[in-house]
Amino acid sequence: MNKTILITGGAGFIGSHVVREFVNKYPAYRIVNLDALTYAGNLENLKDIEDKPNYTFVKADITDAKHIMEVFQEYQPDGVIHLAAESHVDRSITDPSAFVMTNVIGTVNLLNAAREIWKDNYEGKRFHHVSTDEVYGTLGETGLFTEETAYDPHSPYSASKASSDHFVRAYQDTYGLPVVLTNCSNNYGPNHFPEKLIPLCIHNILNTKPLPIYGDGKFTRDWLFVIDHAKAIDLVFHQGKNGQSYNVGGFNEWQNIDLVKELCKQMDEKLGRPAGTAAELITFVKDRPGHDLRYAIDATKINQELGYKPSVTFEQGLSITIDWFLANQEWLDNVTSGEYQSYYAKQYN
Ligand code: NAD
């Protein structure tokens, strides 16, 4: 093995796709997946690669500074790709402290461990922080977030991610730690936890339950297929410039209501049901507090500097995603039993 790459949050939604991409594409790298296995972490997501010789899993909590330092000392990573986070805006509204602990303190613990084992000799080393477009706040009806857009987070989730981004940049500015950042738009795809809009609607259509849409459904998000995000992370990790941020997106904006209608249309077709069956389940619910109206990414920099392009259109990606959920209903049943039930009842009933 010529390099060790430590990926945090590798049992989660996006992290599992990043781990798979790296394990399969770089057999000469040792890939260490560090994850605490919270409700969002699921090793089932990695069943197909768990026996590969270049893959190792370590259960660790990034809020535990001592344990994190021990893991870094044992594995001596050359690179870190940091995805572990509390990631759900609604949960951040009910319990902000968990977001501060994992997203802010956890990130600082990782930065300290990287600095310590690299001992200020940064040749060939890199810390890649994976973040979100939500740090930029909200847009009106026009305009796009660029890498120069000022941070203006509104939810406890986005405030914690913005804070972690600042710490990552501060470690570059203060200690010279070689960092890169990516700020990506909303992801969707296989293994997506069904508290988020698309998998939640797929799950509810399968169970003939209401499809809850916040407010008037006009909230607009920019959506990227998760495997295209994993490929962007690979590109930036290997070819991005130190100290730089790259916005990642597909120039693919959808109002929530239009997205759910497209999803309903595809679900009816795939399930052989009359057109309009799933859409009858659409139910408007009370808006979440501090809800940002519109996010949209200007991905020109990553496109032009690194030649990045998403591989699928939204309609194709959505079709692949639905097919995956239909073929993996046991996965869906497993993650929606237990804690999910009480979370769902509190959130929507
Ligand atoms: P996720 O919630 O699906 O997965 C998070 C993973 O982190 C889980 O495996 C969980 O077990 C692990 N984790 C949580 N707390 C931990 C801790 N204290 N120590 C160790 N591991 C811990 O999240 P995701 O949607 O895959 O997002 C991954 C990253 O990408 C996050 O940093 C998120 O902010 C960012 N991001 C997500 C999106 C999106 O649309 N989902 C978009 C842009 C950026």
Image (cartoon, rainbow, N blue to C red):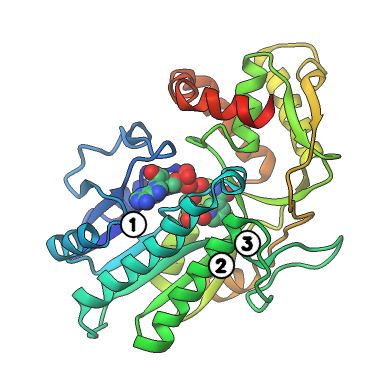
Q: Residue 256 carries which label?
A: none
- Label 2 CB less than 8 angstroms from ligand 1: no
Callout 2 touching callout 3 (CB < 8 Å): no
Mark 2 or 3, nearer chain start: 3
* Residue at x 81%, y 17% (from the top left corner): 275
Along the viewing direction, whichever of 204 and 344 lies nearer the viewer: 344
- Residues packed near mark 3 inside 10 Å, few (<14), some (14 to 19) or many (20 plus): many
Side (left or right) of 311 relative to 177: right
Along the viewing direction, whichever of 253 and 269 lies nearer the viewer: 253
Query: Does residue 106 appear in this view?
Result: yes
- Label 1 CB less than 8 angstroms from ligand 1: yes
Residue marked by disc 3:
133
* Number of numbered markers: 3
Residue marked by disc 2:
162
* Residue at x 65%, y 36% (from the top left corner): 197
Residue 226 to residue 45: above or below? below
Task: List x then y, in percent, for residue 246.
Answer: 55, 71
- Residues packed near mark 1 inside 10 Å, few (<14), some (14 to 19) or many (20 plus): many
Q: Residue 63 carries which label?
A: 1
Residue 252 to residue 72: above or below? above
Specify the amino acid type for callout 1.
Thr
- Asked which secondary structure carries label 2, the reply is helix
